[in-house]
Image (cartoon, rainbow, N blue to C red):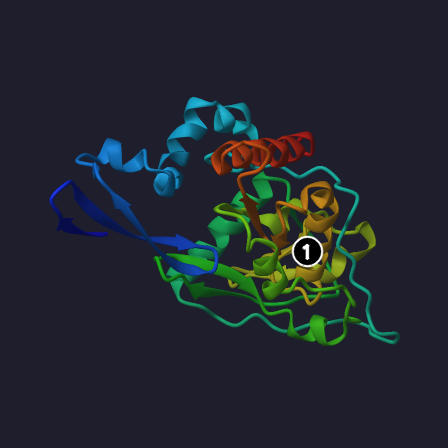
């Protein structure tokens, strides 16, 4: 943000140059003002800066507190409810067993894997088993530190019939938000673990660990061939009534609003958020 001052015999005008971030990139705006702002409070009162007050307004209007059960600090450790869509694994005819042996890993990674499965066991999302299928488990380093637990489902995926599900296009989503002036992006945390496995397809999800355990997933794990398509289909189905102002791209929901019918963009956006969060609330057990 910068300012340039010009003078004449009757008035002093300041040009306020503002750089803001929008869904399509950085946007530059320029305003000429006879009485330029002199404090942060005055600055955020400018129409062009209304988005800076938005987070504060959300708390004052109880938008977040009304829906705190769908915006928890920690996701409840429990088996999710059936949302009407379960993940299915349709194998190529003639497929018998998909097995890849587990390989050794460093001690710290073994502990990370054991801790991960213990937390999932307590949540009721995995169970111990004896299965003809088995895929190895490994760790991938996270950029922010710690380990991401993944499974090498290569053989299972090679034997899985691909699901032909429409994939959302980024350009279409961005175009749909072109006339909106305020945006909120929501990330659906642990989204895959909110979808149940079809009972008959639980056995092929079996994974081994370096410590000698074998687990099968009751919810959709990361790494399965058609898992992204199933997740996208589930989210699209559940949020279809708000897609005009809240399109989805896998686990991201983009809420966007313009100023309409005499209401400011902030007022409209809060209405949109209430509708979206209320819909999610009704889907939460």
Foreground residue among 226 and 41: 41
Relative horizontal placement of residue 94, taking residue 234 as reference (left or right): right
Where's residue 227, x and y in %?
68, 60
Foreground residue among 117 and 93: 93
Where's residue 137, x and y in %?
55, 64
At x 73%, y 41%, the residue is 241
Q: Which residue is mark 1?
A: 232
Foreground residue among 67 and 34: 34
Relative horizontal placement of residue 21, taking residue 14 as reference (left or right): right
Quarter occupied by the C terminus: top right
The mark total stands at 1
Foreground residue among 43 and 172: 43
Quadrant in the rendering for residue 98: bottom right
Relative horizontal placement of residue 234, taking residue 101 as reference (left or right): right
At x 63%, y 67%, the residue is 135
Q: Residue furthest front?
A: 9
Quadrant in the rendering for residue 134: bottom right
Where's residue 261, x and y in %?
59, 33
At x 56%, y 35%, the residue is 273
Tell me if residue 188 can be seen. Answer: no
């Amino acid at each position: 943000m910068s300012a340039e001052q010009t003078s004449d015999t009757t008035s002093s005008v300041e040009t306020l140059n503002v750089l803001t971030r929008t869904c399509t990139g950085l946007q530059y705006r320029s305003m000429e003002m006879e009485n330029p702002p002199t404090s942060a409070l005055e600055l955020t009162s400018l129409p062009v800066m209304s988005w800076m007050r938005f987070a504060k307004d959300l708390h004052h209007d109880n938008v977040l507190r009304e829906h705190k059960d769908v915006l928890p600090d920690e996701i409840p450790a429990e088996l999710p409810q059936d949302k009407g869509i379960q993940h299915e694994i349709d194998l190529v005819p003639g497929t018998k067993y998909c097995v890849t042996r587990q390989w050794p890993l460093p001690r710290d990674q073994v502990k990370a894997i054991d801790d991960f499965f213990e937390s999932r066991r307590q949540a009721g999302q995995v169970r111990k088993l004896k299965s003809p299928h088995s895929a190895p488990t490994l760790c991938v380093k996270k950029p922010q530190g710690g380990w991401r637990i993944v499974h090498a489902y290569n053989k299972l995926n090679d034997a899985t019939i691909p699901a032909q599900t429409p994939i959302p296009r980024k350009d279409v989503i961005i175009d749909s938000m072109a006339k909106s002036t305020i945006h909120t992006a929501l990330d659906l945390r642990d989204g895959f673990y909110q979808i149940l496995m079809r009972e008959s397809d639980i056995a092929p999800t079996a994974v081994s660990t370096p410590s000698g355990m074998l687990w099968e997933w009751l919810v959709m794990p990361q790494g399965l061939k058609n898992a992204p398509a199933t997740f996208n289909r589930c989210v699209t189905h559940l949020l279809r009534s708000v897609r005009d102002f809240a399109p989805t791209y896998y686990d991201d929901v983009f809420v966007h609003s313009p100023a309409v019918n005499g209401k400011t963009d902030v007022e409209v956006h809060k209405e949109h958020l209430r509708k979206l969060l209320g819909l999610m609330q009704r889907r939460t057990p």
